[in-house]
Amino acid sequence: MGAIAASPAVRYTPSATKVPTAANYLDLSDMSYSTHEIPDMDKTLNKRYGSQMIDGWFEKTGRKIPYASDVITWTEEDRLTQLATGVARTADVFTLAGHTFRAGEVITAFLPDGTISRQGRISATTSTTFTASCGDAAGWTALGATGISVFADISEFLKGSAGMQESLNTTYQQYTTRGTITKEMVSENRTNMTQISWLKMTDNSSGETLGYVWYNVNRENAEKRFRNKRESANFNSKEWAGDLLAAGYKGREGLFASMAQGNIFAGTISDRASAESMVARLEKQGQLRDNIIYGTTAFCFAQDAFLADTNQIGLSYGAFNNSADMALNLSFKGYQLGGYEFSYSALQYLKEATAQGAMAGVTKVNGFLVPSASQSVTDPMQGTTSVKPMIHVRNRSYGAMNRDYELSVFDWAKGTSNTDTIRTEFQSEQATVLIGRANTILFKG
């Protein structure tokens, strides 16, 4: 097995500095004053590491919805019926505080290891107990006195009898999040701004000439950093405690923090057993059938290898629809298992070498799964129901005021700056909403 040499190493040196450098401007030797047209100079600014933007992810999985308050709240409905665990029993009386079982329902009582199962009908209830007659000649005895699991999915009544005497009230679980403000700025002295230099912009991957721009790389990169911070907050934000909370900073719940309350998968999907365990959990959560998995390159490699190992015909011509006159395709786009469909692809945010890509071990997020669907959401303030994407971004907005993406320029010449500079400031106020976190999976470690 080969390995990449440790030297030369990955370059982590940032392009940003706190003071202007000579590299920010063209040298006099690069310019000619004999012509006033845009020079066709072979001075190319290549995007060596890419833009690192994640706009595409939100275009595929969500949309922006305005909000006008400090707090965003929504409710999600719980399950229709109860699975009770840790139930105690004495004779025909089962004990569980706060149960929702009712007289007339037929229960299935069983041991978690699957060795014993009995059915019977509830005849009476209190707030902490339910009395049930066993429908098996052997009675309830074999279940023991503790650690029993119970569910009720049937009811049965005698001819001419009264119906169900207890009503159940639907309960909801309420979730709350808030927006946070992201800021960035760049300041340039006006003397440097008079040194007009033109650069030919080229896309390094395609070789396509993007055109000519006035070379103000500080402002361009400041805006990129602002947009990256704004969007990364949707993934990696947390609600603060400790010293930050005491100082007035509250933070917000990002996607990773929300998904950590749903389902966490340790490691990668590297074999059929891993995939089957994922499906088994999704079955218990009432999961939707169509799902998207975003991960690191290594996470996608693990799934590629698992799917390749499943196909035993080998890497000959025709395997995986490859042919002799095309490049060998060793990757897959997705798979179906147990009636569920999973498509997967790499996400730049998770592998960025100066952020999430630098992390390792049990804290590393390798990927996440989200259903490709929308959910019905109840607005507790208005009492109305609407359908929203399961993952979406909320931007602070009311009337003509929209704080999704704000930009302001302070210039000495316009009297908006008391220094001989042009300062550009960016700010945004956004929140992230994940509806149905029990339907997601966070792959860590």
Image (cartoon, rainbow, N blue to C red):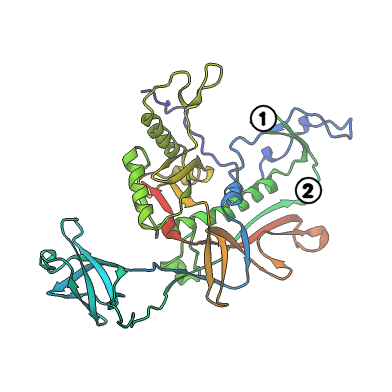
Earlier-in-chain disc, 1 versus 2: 2
For mark 1, give the secondary structure.
loop
328 or 231: nearer the viewer: 328
Q: Which residue is mark 1?
A: 206
Look at 41% across and 74% down and name the residue there: 171
Q: Between 360 and 307, which is closer to the camera in this rendering?
A: 307
Which residue in the protein does label 2 denote?
A: 191
In the rendered picture of this protein, how many numbered marks are placed on residues? 2
x, y percent for residue 168: 38, 78
Q: Is residue 343 above or below residue 288?
A: above
Asked if residue 388 shows in the view, the reply is yes
The residue drawn where x is 36% and y is 48% is: 278
Q: Secondary structure at mark 2?
A: helix
Q: Identify the residue at image location x=45%, y=55%.
A: 256
User: In terms of depth relative to the viewer, which is nearer, 415 or 430?
Assistant: 430
Please provide percent x and percent y for residue 43. 73, 30
Residue 129 position within the rendered picture, expressed as x and y whole percent measured from the top left? 22, 78
Rendered-image quadrant of the N terminus: top left
Q: Is residue 358 left or right of residue 229?
A: left
> Mark 1 against mark 2, which lies toward the viewer?
1
- Marks 1 and 2 close (CB-CB < 8 Å): no
Residue 75 is left or right of residue 150, and the answer is right
Q: Amino acid at mark 2?
A: Thr
Q: Amino acid at mark 1?
A: Ser
Query: Is residue 106 found left or right of 296 in the rendered image?
Result: left
